Image: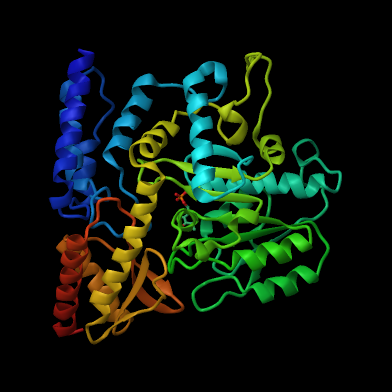
Amino acid sequence: MHRAVLETAHAIAAKYLEEVASRHVGGMAARESLKAALGGPLPKNGTDPVVVLNDLATCADPGIVASAGPRYFGFVTGGAVPVTVAADWLASAWDQNTCLYVMSPAAAAIEDAVSGWILELLGLPRGASVGFVTGCHMANFTCLAAARHAVLRRLGWNVETQGLQRAPRIRVIAGGDVHVSAVSALRYLGFGTDEIDLIPVDAQGRMRADALDAALRRSDAPTIVCTQAGNVSTGACDPLDAIVKSAHAKGAWVHVDGAFGLWAGAVPELRALVEGIEGADSWATDAHKWLNVPYDSGLAIVADAAPHRAAMSMKASYLQRGADEERAGGDWVPESSRRARVLPLYALFRSLGGDGIAAIVRRNCMLARRMADRLSAESGISILNDVVLNQVLVRFIDDHTTGRVITAVQAEGTCWAGGVMWRNNQAMRISVSNWSTTEADIDRSADAILNCFRASSQEPS
Ligand SMILES: Cc1ncc(COP(=O)(O)O)c(C=O)c1O
């Protein structure tokens, strides 16, 4: 019976992935019809598991977004390289808990191996500690908890035991375009949003190093500087080299939110964008974006393992560790019980190698420029950002037309892109982050977008 159930899921998944590139990219179903198909009263009696899976696939299908496919350009969304999907199935089948070494020696060894590979590929300090978390949001939380610990510890205050309420005041500095997840992480850590000292940014959203320097000079308080590699709209990276130098001169902790931009560090010709990154104190990134492993997968990396462990680890008499336990996965993450989400990463690194991973990043950036060139050749269309990475901001004449084109593109279904307000201008936001996107996908999508634009500009407003 086990086999029949697993083979049913395998057949559904394989068919889906074979067809994903030819689906209408957006979700097709209305909310009410999905609720009717998938909801209903609490099932009182059981149903044959094979029937359950087949029904699930049929009923969910109209509401499935082809975000794993090559022409989904929404948000910043990676697909999943097939071997990583397969390894993810193993994570579920083996169902390992990666909290302690004794719970899964294999998962602990794999986390160790993959940590080393990640640090090497990104050119980060080899002694840094790595936590395998759900995404960059939790990675930001984890790293900033380590930062909070470290800057107070230097003043003799242990925030883990003494708390924050009577602690010396910490100053938190971030660029004006700080990602909302870093702000949210700071909130979880006891910092109010009004307390964040926002530094002016340039036209691409990069923190201005001169303004940061001036702000740093204004106070000697323990300081955390939250920087960004990869602005969520433009892809621009803060001038990390200058930031690290002036922040460290003042004893501040430098955190880098590099959900996708950190991976520029893996590509020699893009590395200049993140020059100086190795000098920071902590780095948060996603694997489910540019590493193209399935959700959910993020990485919290801290140069000095001690504050990382101090901020995250727990002790209880029943959580007994083996005598030879070096690594407990739970020491580096906010969760205790946790799946072996490192397995897809292991499979990715083994099957593509560092060069193969870098090739995805490089190709996506090239394709983003191709998209920008195709669209900007049309009169009435402008590209609002410098396309330095994989992000393209497109404006169609004015706010109204841009909104109409976004709606039309989503309904047409060749590709999917969302919208953003960029410096008070409505823009279409295109993010090329999928391992399987080709030049042909870009050309087909550009044609579809151009057709929607031409049709929208002819309609009465
Ligand atoms: C710069 C940046 N930081 C953090 C995040 C949050 O990542 P996640 O939603 O994967 O946790 C994102 C998501 O797009 C991002 O672009």
In the picture shown, does residue 96 fall above or below 303?
above
Q: Nearer the viewer, residue 109 or 187?
A: 109
Q: Position of residue 419 (x, y in %)?
A: 34, 68
Residue shown at 52%/25% (left/top)?
108
Q: Where does residue 177 sit, x and y in percent of width and height? A: 54, 68
Counting from the top left corner in percent of width and height, residue 42 is at 28, 27
The residue lying furthest to the bottom in this view is 379
Residue in view at x 41 percent, y 34 percent: 346
Quarter of the image where one finds residue 224: bottom right
Q: Quick check: 327 above or below 181?
A: above
Q: Nearer the viewer, residue 187 or 349?
A: 349
If the image is split into quadrants, where does the C terminus sit? bottom left
Looking at the rendered image, the quarter that the N terminus falls into is top left
Q: Position of residue 234 (x, y in %)?
A: 43, 69
Left or right: 412 as drawn, with respect to 388: left
In this orientation, does residue 277 appear? yes
Q: Is residue 341 visible?
A: no
Front-lying residue, 221 or 376: 376
The residue under the point 56% across, 43% down is 300
Kindly indicate the quadrant of the structure image that contains residue 10.
top left
Relative side of 304 to 422, left or right: right
For the point 34% across and 31% down, the residue is 88
